[in-house]
Image (cartoon, grey):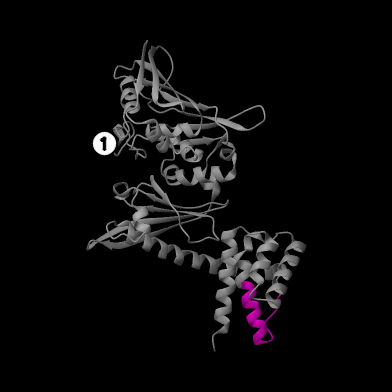
Amino acid sequence: MTSALIHLEAADDHVERLAHEQDPVRAVLELVWNGLDADAHRVEVELLRNEAGGVDGVVVTDDGHGMGPQDVEDDFRWIGGSWKRRSVRSRGEGRPLHGRSGQGRLRVFALGHEVRWTTTAADAAGRLTESTVTASSARRSDFSVTSRQVERGAPGTRVEARGRQGLNRLETDTARAAVTAALAPYLMSQGHVDVVYDGTRLVVADTVARDETIALRWEFGGQPHEAVLQVIEWKGRHRSLQLCDDEGVVVEEVETPVGRDFSYSAYVQWEHMPEHAGESVLAALGGQDTPLTPLLARVEAELERHFEGRRAQGREEAVQEWHQRGTHPYPGPARTAEEERARARFDAVAATVRQHVPRALKQQRLVLGLLADALARDPSGAARVVSELLDLPPAERQAVQDAASATGQEQSRPT
């Protein structure tokens, strides 16, 4: 057995910044990606709970190829020295790689003050070596390592982080949705891979309401470029825009103001995306030195077009269903031009919040009737009434306001 102390060549405060210690979901994702980059077929995320039921630690286990003693020495001594930076494919199965900067191991400090890696790897002759790495947030740059040969076992890595408060967000539906969204393209393309989160296997198909792919074409520097935009609408609540390589491995997540009334993830898949990691900030400022500026402008336009079509489709389907159920407050054909305008205004606003309208017949009739009355009494203030009645989140309140305003403008035009 051998023992050593590896000192990371970086200051503690720099390590702390790289760890993103206020973002435990991101830390869990990095550990999952580390396992997938090691050709794991199964990665399990276990949330550790204390006696009060609160989450105060995390264990991530994978059955990948593990790290040998030399890998441990290399990976824990340098930031940015990871072998992944010199590769685009995993060592064994040639899968697309996610992490290439060597910073993922630092983010584990977002999950615990005391951290332990236990990793087993086989050498060329098939001999197994188990290495244990321990570290503490008190000295983030120091990693204690012991290695020993073992007769039994299998390659793989277990990362255990304990002793940190404020991890309860990891057990929320929001956290699960974020993990699923980040991994979705990879899991859909790698059908032999399982990720288990807090005891439940992530099955992307179970959470997908709709999946559409859109071809993107744009120019930069006088050269044409092509990419793919995949838009997955979720059954639960989540919204994100992910910049990926051409195999769906996420390079960066950026904010998007588009489709605030939809639950979705949009994946921009472009083979050169890894070369432009971090340039989204420059693109948001209108920088002309990055191809992401025209690309993201194209993405926003396509998403606007996509969701406008989905809104029209949703309005038509919702209104048709309400008529069939007898809950629509305007049954039969319109008798006057004023009633026609009121009906159109109601359909536009009510269909925008259709997912919040109760399914029970009596409740649905009551809520739709109240919405129609509010719109008839005060169209300009109805958005506020609708939002309060249905307790809408801010993004959807704005969508209601937009729908009411658009309908009002449309109706005010001379015929």
Q: Is residue 211 above or below residue 373?
A: above
In the image, farthest residue toward the left: 222
x, y percent for residue 9 = 32, 28
Residue marked by disc 1: 86
**Magenta: predominant secondary structure element?**
helix
In the image, farthest residue toward the top: 1
x, y percent for residue 319 = 63, 70
Residues drawn in magenta? 330-347
Q: Element at badge 1?
A: helix
Question: Which residue is at 29% across, 56% downward?
Answer: 290
Query: Which sits in the foreground, 327 or 405?
Result: 405
Question: Does the magenta-highlighted stretch encompass residue 345?
Answer: yes
* Image quarter of residue 255: bottom left
Q: Is residue 386 above or below residue 57?
A: below
Q: Amino acid at mark 1?
A: Arg
Tag count: 1
Question: Does the magenta-highlighted stretch encompass residue 365?
Answer: no
Would residue 327 be seen by someone viewing this image from the given angle? no
x, y percent for residue 321 = 65, 67
